[in-house]
Image: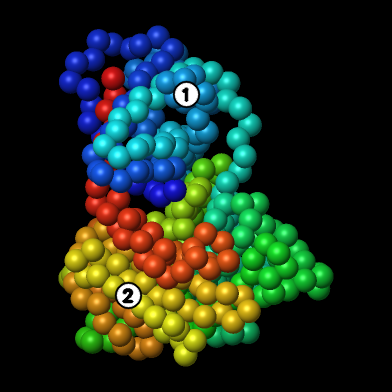
Amino acid sequence: MKKTILIVIPALLLFGCHKGSMEVAVLNTTGSDRKAEMIEIPVQEITSRISNASLNEIIVIDKSGNEIPSQLLYEGNKAPVKLLFEADLPASAEKTYVIKNGISQQYKEKVYGRFVPERMDDYTWENDRIAFRIYGTALIKKDGPSNGLDVWVKRTDMMIVNIWYSEYLTGKNSYHDDNGTGCDCYKVGRTLGAGAMAPYVNDSLWLGINFSSYKTLDNGPLRTSFRLFYPPFDVDGTLVTETRTFSLDAGSQMNMVTEEYKGIDRPFDVAAGIVLRPEGISKDSSPEKGYITYCQDAGESGIIYLGTVLQSPAKEIIEEAGHLLIKTTYTPGEKLTYCTGAGWSKWGFENEEAWIKYIEDYSARIRNPLKVTFK
């Protein structure tokens, strides 16, 4: 359900490679159930423990011998760097999984993303719960600049963005209308949209422009990720460049977003923000838990729920420049990762209270990662 930053604890006593397999113990130290969370195992841990390991012929099984869907992560490299698989753990429970040599099944694709040059250089991505879009350079001539995040709400676990684009571009249907699988009923414009980030310097929010190039890093079946590169933009008289890396896992409403800025040589404030609209219903926030939420009426299309979560307490939460902003500090030369996403009243979230609980649980889980031990 959610991507988790894992605490990996190597076993203290290792007696060489285990022929053909290794055990991975996953511990939930919290009092809440953890469902469909992603476990990342570095490739070097696998090759050092499994003799004659062929990474293209590796499977994960549970204690009952059932195969668990998995994915090799390349993260933009030529060779895989991690193995990803999904785990369900009850509160305060531990489960053991086995990684072994074997031929994997054909897993159902639960995530997908691609560059869409036929629709003015969009980059669009989705999972079995939700979809998102961000804008490329070609759209500037038509709609002006925008580096905000767009949301496409879904009520199907099918991968549908290609269908929506095809029907839209051929005039068969518009993805702005709900034809049974969801729709694009969220407007971004010259804003941060659904939780994008921007420098906040000298008491002002400084918006960038559309991305100029991209690199797809991984693309299913459990995680899709990509990197966007932005041209220089003005931040209080200084030209700054921005790189964003997005990662979306199967089952999750939330993206992991990693920001990198260059051009300012001292720490400075940044703010992730949700645009405030006249059709907004309510909002909620917690500086201590590091999150903001917003509830927006989309008329006949239902209600869109938005949320942004930091990995640490917020420096400040304010309403400014037409946004609900959650602020933190960016340190040059480092990466800053936060999370942002959305839900829908027509699929999965009956009311605002259900969405706020989801965000609170998500915030708690990224601060209390599952513990992984190799046996």
Q: Is residue 31 visible?
A: yes
Q: Confirm or deny contact between disc 2 and disc 1 (CB under 8 A).
A: no
Task: Look at the picture and state if 347 lies above or below 79.
Answer: below
Residue 301 vs residue 118, the one in the foreground? 301
Numbered marks: total: 2
Residue drawn 41% across and 65% down? 355
Please name the amino acid that badge 2 sits on.
Answer: Asp
Q: Is residue 335 visible?
A: no
Crowding around mark 1 (Cα neighbors within 10 Å: few <14, some 14 to 19, many 20+) is: some
Residue 317 vs residue 352, the one in the foreground? 352
Distance of label 2 from label 1 (alpha carbons): 41 Å
Residue 29 vs residue 59, the one in the foreground? 29
Disc nearest the viewer among 2 and 1: 2
- Where in the figure is residue 164, as x and y percent of width and height? 70, 64
Please name the amino acid that badge 1 sits on.
Answer: Ile
Q: Is residue 102 left or right of residue 275?
A: right
- Where in the figure is residue 222, as x and y percent of width and height? 51, 43
Residue drawn 25% across and 73% down? 327
The local secondary structure at tag 2 comes to strand
Residue 154 vs residue 14, the one in the foreground? 154
Q: Is residue 131 left or right of residue 203?
A: right
User: Which residue is denoted by mark 2 in the rendering?
Assistant: 284
User: Which residue is denoted by mark 1 in the rendering?
Assistant: 61
Task: Look at the picture and state if 148 lies above or below 339.
Answer: below
Q: Is residue 10 left or right of residue 275?
A: left
Crowding around mark 2 (Cα neighbors within 10 Å: few <14, some 14 to 19, many 20+) is: few
Res. 57 image quadrant? top right
Residue drawn 49% across and 86% down? 279
The local secondary structure at tag 1 comes to strand
- Where in the figure is residue 142, as x and y percent of width and height? 63, 84
- Where in the figure is residue 31, as x and y percent of width and height? 26, 44
Q: Which is more N-terminal, label 1 or label 2?
A: 1
